[in-house]
Image (cartoon, rainbow, N blue to C red):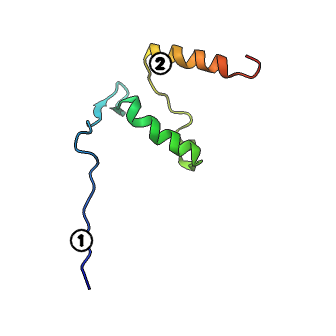
Amino acid sequence: MARCQLRIYNGPADHTLPTLDEGPTGRRNVTMSVGDILPLLADAVESRRTWLRDFEDDEITISTDLYEVLLAYQHYCRPGA
């Protein structure tokens, strides 16, 4: 019987690591690109993962450009808009 060899997958080799820093409140913060986090969040929302509710009240910081785009998108997605 052939032995199955398991390997540990550490992600793609060209993937940049998130930046970790400590905020003014002493909480540790991680900075990641939107491109890295959106697919994960979209999958979690689509799969209705219950752990998302644990973070509903957490605040995030986004660029003003992204904020303006999200406001415009929200305006045009409203029923009757």
Give the farthest residue toward the front. Answer: 2
Instruction: Looking at the picture, tell me which residue is in the foreground, 25 or 6.
Output: 6
Dot 1: few (<14), some (14–19), or many (≥20) neighbours within 10 Å?
few
Q: Who's the residue at 75% across and 23% down the image?
A: 79
Is label 2 in a helix, a strand or a loop? helix
The x and y percentages for residue 37 are 42, 36
**Image check: 15 left or right of 32?**
left
Q: Is residue 22 above or below residue 47?
A: above
- At label 1, the amino acid type is Gln
From the image, tell me which residue sits under label 2: 66
Q: Is residue 30 above or below residue 67?
A: below
**Image check: 29 left or right of 17?**
right
Number of dots carrying numbers: 2
Give the number of the mark in front: 1 or 2.
1
* Marks 1 and 2, the one that precedes in the sequence: 1
Q: Is residue 7 above or below residue 28?
A: below
From the image, tell me which residue sits under label 1: 5
Is label 1 in a helix, a strand or a loop? loop
Q: Who's the residue at 52% across and 16% down the image?
A: 69
* Rendering quarter of residue 33: top left
Q: CA distance from mark 1 to mark 2?
A: 45 Å
**Image check: 67 left or right of 23?**
right
Q: Who's the residue at 59% across and 19% down the image?
A: 73
The x and y percentages for residue 59 are 49, 28
* Rendering quarter of residue 54: top right
Q: Who's the residue at 52% across and 13% down the image?
A: 68
* Rendering quarter of residue 70: top right
The x and y percentages for residue 32 are 35, 32
Give the farthest residue toward the right. Answer: 80
Dot 2: few (<14), some (14–19), or many (≥20) neighbours within 10 Å?
few
